[in-house]
Amino acid sequence: MPLDLGMYDSRADYKSQKQCQKTSFAFYQAVRDLLPVWVLEDMRTMEVFHWEEDGRACAYSPSEAFLYALVHDHQQYARYLLNRFSVRALEMPSRSFCCCQASTSPHLAIAARYNRINILKMIMGTIKDFTDCERQSYLNRHGCFHTDGSKTALHLACDLVRPECLILLLGHGASPYATDVAGNTPLDGLLNQICQSDFDMRSKHICLGYLILFMPKFRFQTKRQLLDNADMWKNLIGEQAFRWLSGSSPPSLFVQAMQKLSQQSIPIEQLNSLPEFLKPLGFRLDQA
């Protein structure tokens, strides 16, 4: 009886795929359990493989390992990967990790989604040596069309109400005017969150204050809704903020001065060291 080589190869591939699944899950567990960096790197470089769609078993790249560090907030491992591999740790992972290869910036999106503020600061430190053009291109890349609706990390920070992520992204050059597949800006997403419920309104108002400080021109799709439902929006965001966003009056001199300050190339650390009364965090828009 002749040997069916096709069947043999298929079974061999199946065994290889099953083995990849086992080792891949073991690596996932190891990062989740915050094992020491040297253990994780030994696993990544010597033992662990994942299965690609084209039928290849591949070792985890620094970028793919960094995704796991982000998800599980393994800050020591994240710091090691960025220090050891620099921008290589921020490269696009393989298609098995992210289907939209041409347009996404998954590390920023995951940092915003999981509110990984400390690791996001590390990323900002890594990209500080980029040119302005390279940095803005990286910060403003659109996310996966299938999972995020082509949103940027700034959109996600607003949708999920992440004030710390928001100010880090804005302070390092992320554009508040970027639009998703539906044409919505981050401000549109935040106003939608404000309108939906009164949960954690303080954080929502802080996010709104940050966006106002980084938007010298208020361009967003929801403006028509503000004008059509003025009383409701005045109650939700305050009389003063409503007037600014609707265009019925210019921002106060204080806010205009802060907008000018935010447009300068000032490190976010210096912005954070401003006196308390100048910090946008917690400042009431209706009293500015």
Image (cartoon, helix red, strand yellow):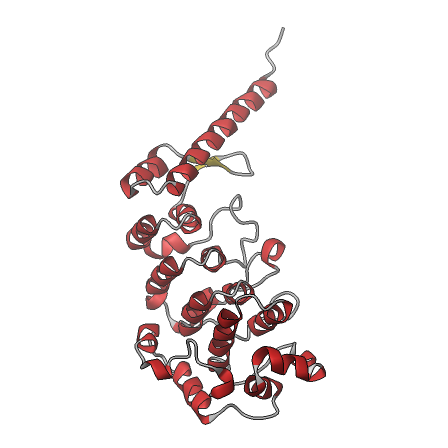
Near-viewer residue (216 or 201): 201
Residue 134 image point, x, y percent = 42, 68
Q: Is residue 183 left or right of residue 212?
A: right
Query: Which residue is the extreme one toward the right?
Result: 228
Quadrant location of residue 147?
bottom right
Residue pictured at 59% horizontal, 61% vertical:
150
Residue 16 in sight here: yes
Quadrant location of residue 131?
bottom left
* Number of numbered discs: 0
Residue 175 in sight here: no
Residue 207 image point, x, y percent = 49, 72
Near-viewer residue (7 or 202): 202
Q: Is residue 115 left or right of residue 270?
A: right
Decide: is 200 above or below 285.
above
Residue 273 image point, x, y percent = 30, 77
Near-viewer residue (260 or 243): 243
Residue pictured at 41% horizontal, 51% vertical:
70
Q: Is residue 124 left or right of residue 140?
A: left
Decide: is 83 above or below 160.
above
Residue 254 image point, x, y percent = 43, 90
Near-viewer residue (177 or 96): 177
Residue pictured at 55% horizontal, 37% vertical:
54
Task: Tell me the quadrant of the picture where the N terminus can be found.
Answer: top right
Decide: is 260 above or below 48.
below
